[in-house]
Amino acid sequence: MTQNNRSPWDAGRFIKTLSYFEVIPFLSCLQRLFTGRANNQQSSQGREKDMGVILVAGATGGVGKRVVRCLVERNYPVRALVRNAQKAREILGDNLELFEADITIPETLTPALYKNITAVVCCTGARVQPVEGDTPNREKYDQGIKFYRPEVVDSPELLEYQGIKNLVQAAAEYLEPGKQLLFDFQNPSDDLQETDRKSVGVGRLSSV
């Protein structure tokens, strides 16, 4: 393709692309402010009717507690799989259900854990803490400023391999097989119509 045959650069589409992928935080915030509230309210009203309980394993970890918070804020019913319910309640609050179990012990993954479950989010991981130890609330680990020499407390093989295997095998008995399409390049949604399917980068088109 020669220089003279190239299509003129569409600045408007460029801005829409940046906004869609939230590259410009300010534009994304404005977009959510004016269009997100109504959509969120409508979706939240029917969500509890359409959506079953979401099971979150590893709910008290760094990632898990953030996942729980996001789900609760969006009015999803959440059941957290935890090893210590009292400690978990202090971390996660009262707006969710707690279930004491241990994914490394299959016998604790009872049918009650999976009652009315339609999705499982696994955030488990081997626990890491400073060599000299940490407080019960893991204040040293979470502060993120001062460096502490780390050590792995749990066995990664036992927790991240065998434990997740136990969780998945037990869940398979109660969850129906299914699939969720995340993105379709052949038939883009209305939100993506402004983003050319031949785009190989923001603001650039391939010469094919």
Image: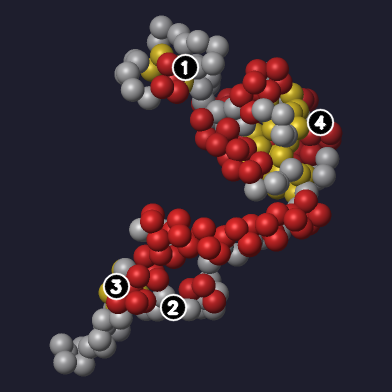
Q: Are marks 2 and 1 in contact (CB under 8 Å)?
A: no
If the image is split into quadrants, where does the N terminus sit?
Answer: bottom left
Spatial separation of the CA atoms under disc 3 and disc 2: 12 Å
Image quadrant assignment for residue 94: top right
**Residue 150: percent from the left, percent from the top?**
38, 17
Q: What amino acid type should be assigned to the residue bearing mark 1?
A: Glu
Q: Residue furthest left?
A: 3
Read off the residue under disc 3: 203
Q: Is residue 149 left or right of residue 184?
A: left
| Residue at disc 3, secondary structure | loop
**Residue 36: percent from the left, percent from the top?**
57, 60
Spatial separation of the CA atoms under disc 2 and disc 1: 46 Å
Read off the residue under disc 1: 139
If the image is split into quadrants, where does the C terminus sit?
Answer: bottom left
Residue 83 seen: no
Q: What amino acid type should be assigned to the residue bearing mark 3?
A: Gly
Spatial separation of the CA atoms under disc 2 and disc 4: 48 Å
Read off the residue under disc 2: 194
Query: At 81% from the left edge and 54% from the top edge, which residue is drawn?
Result: 49
Read off the residue under disc 4: 110
Image quadrant assignment for residue 123: top right
| In this rendering, the label closer to the viewer, 1 or 4 | 1
